[in-house]
């Protein structure tokens, strides 16, 4: 593949491009689903192609193709150069890339069991067993189980001299049960909603989930929610479980810290950010115990790789340190705009046919030192919420509201009755500022986000957010539905 890639680099050098690269990507995706006792989806597809970027006189050009010949690669590279020349007529300012050493390397996601060697029959059997347990109550109208596996084999070559081969592997699954009675509809999911849990690794991730072992609880809680009281509205203390806190991190910190968004490049489509560059290094984003760390080296992380799509080596850094805004997600194009000499390596593309853009890295709330029992025990009147159902956040990533699948009231330090349709709302820095305790490392888990959308044309990216349950004081609580 590198022999084929070399043709694009040759063309870029010939036309005196300041920078050029080619990413050849072979990707295999397998998706399986069972719904109400029947197979609902079963696909297994492979794609192969390449994307070529060139930077000519400070303007980007990008083109992609899937014909795997030197002639086709050369033609695509010439198309990218022509696009760069046309882009110069409209560019607001010259693009300058931060320097990065050249690398020759191979990197692969660690795994124990290759999921693509596991027979489809074995996967379906596991889902049918789960489905049977989920449907052992007539109030369950919809029972579903899903699995998904992705292997991306990438060959990346740049005019800087980098020659990087990577194999990225992810595995994920989820189950859900929807109960219906007297016009009410309640759903419980495991391990989490919106596509379930996905992590970097192999079949061992699915085995560790034990889908059949959790199906009874999921079913029974969905049914119990039908007769549970509605979440009471008011202001109270809130404990957020890890799977909901992952989305809170994603929406109110992850997207807010993408530097292209901060600089206004996403404003007309997905919005901008309140975390502007004048706040870097001194703005109080949260309480002093709040530490949010981006990490492209994190084991199991969906954004974990040896290098990003700018050929920048993986790094770990603070976005929020001791409550203070301390960093951004950056690429080689934008990092210089905040005085940084090197990119943080947060540049990725969705497949071969999209241009790499700034994306959220793995971003985690560091664990505290409070045992979970104490986290609950110190609450006189409050609520614990789990598993996202809905979210809304404004274009500046400031005002938000999240709805959850389930809540439990806390009275005098004890978790008591279940409540349904809970919501909470807040303003990002005030909300993180109210965080007064984070559960210890024994409760810390990594949660995958496999469907983050951004860009025009739209792209999907994957990343993880690690967290322990955390406590927030005097939060506005309500109910949805």
Image (cartoon, grey):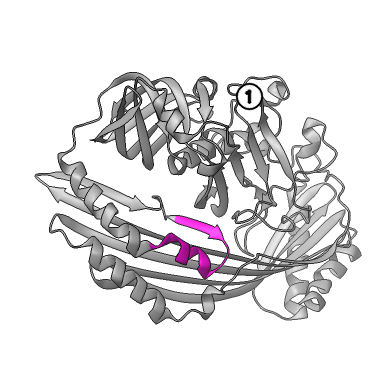
In front: 164, or 362? 362
In the picture, the quarter occupied by the C terminus is top left
Magenta span has 131? Answer: no
In front: 459, or 317? 317
Residue 232 relative to residue 170: left or right: left
Identify residue for label 1: 323
**How many marks can you see?**
1
Q: Is residue 182 above or below residue 212?
A: above
Q: Secondary structure at mark 1?
A: loop
Q: Is residue 253 visible?
A: yes
Q: Is residue 144 above or below residue 417?
A: below
Q: Give the magenta part as a residue range.
A: 197-210
Q: Is residue 112 above or below residue 264?
A: below
Q: Could you tell me which residue is drawn at 53 percent across and 43 percent down?
A: 442
Spot occupied by residue 272 in the image (x, y as percentages of width and height): 58, 32
Q: Is residue 269 visible?
A: no
Q: Could you tell me which residue is drawn at 74 percent across and 57 percent down?
A: 307
């Amino acid at each position: 593949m590198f022999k084929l890639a070399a043709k694009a680099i040759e063309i870029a050098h010939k036309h005196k491009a300041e920078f050029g690269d080619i990413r050849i990507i072979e990707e295999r995706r397998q998706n399986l689903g069972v719904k109400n006792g029947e197979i609902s989806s079963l696909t297994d597809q492979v794609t192969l192609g390449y994307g070529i970027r060139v930077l000519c006189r400070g303007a980007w050009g990008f083109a992609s193709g899937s014909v795997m010949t030197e002639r086709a690669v050369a033609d695509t590279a010439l198309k990218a150069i022509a696009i760069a020349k046309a882009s110069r007529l409209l560019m607001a300012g010259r693009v300058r890339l931060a320097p990065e050493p050249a690398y020759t390397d191979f990197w692969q996601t660690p795994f124990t069991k290759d999921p693509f060697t596991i027979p489809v029959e074995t996967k379906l059997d596991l889902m049918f067993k789960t489905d049977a347990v989920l449907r052992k109550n007539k109030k369950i109208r919809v029972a579903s189980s899903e699995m998904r596996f992705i292997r991306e084999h990438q060959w990346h070559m740049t005019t800087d001299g980098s020659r990087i081969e990577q194999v990225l592997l992810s595995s994920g699954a989820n189950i859900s049960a929807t109960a219906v009675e007297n016009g009410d509809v309640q759903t419980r999911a495991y391990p989490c909603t919106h596509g379930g849990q996905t992590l970097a690794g192999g079949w061992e991730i699915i085995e560790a989930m034990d889908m059949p072992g959790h199906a009874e609880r999921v079913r029974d809680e969905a049914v119990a929610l039908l007769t549970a009281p509605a979440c009471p509205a008011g202001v109270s203390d809130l404990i957020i479980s890890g799977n909901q806190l992952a989305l809170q991190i994603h929406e109110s910190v992850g997207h807010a810290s993408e530097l292209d968004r901060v600089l206004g490049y996403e404003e007309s489509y997905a919005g901008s950010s309140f975390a502007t560059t004048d706040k870097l290094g001194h703005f109080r984003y949260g309480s002093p115990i709040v530490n949010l760390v981006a990490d492209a080296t994190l084991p199991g992380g969906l954004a974990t790789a040896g290098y990003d799509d700018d050929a920048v080596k993986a790094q770990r850094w603070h976005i929020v340190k001791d409550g203070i805004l301390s960093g951004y997600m950056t690429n080689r194009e934008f990092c210089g705009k905040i005085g940084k000499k090197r990119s943080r390596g947060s540049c990725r593309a969705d497949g071969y046919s999209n241009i790499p853009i700034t994306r959220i890295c793995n971003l985690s709330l560091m664990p505290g030192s409070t045992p979970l029992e104490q986290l609950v025990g110190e609450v006189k009147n409050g609520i614990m919420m789990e598993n996202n159902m809905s979210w809304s956040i404004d274009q500046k990533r400031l005002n938000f509201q999240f709805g959850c699948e389930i809540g439990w009231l806390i009275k005098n330090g004890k978790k008591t009755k279940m409540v349904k349709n809970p919501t909470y709302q807040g303003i990002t820095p005030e909300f993180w500022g109210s965080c007064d305790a984070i559960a210890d490392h024994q409760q810390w888990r990594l949660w995958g986000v496999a469907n983050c959308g951004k860009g025009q044309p739209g792209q999907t990216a994957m990343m993880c957010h690690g967290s322990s349950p955390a406590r927030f004081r005097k939060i506005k609580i309500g109910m949805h539905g």
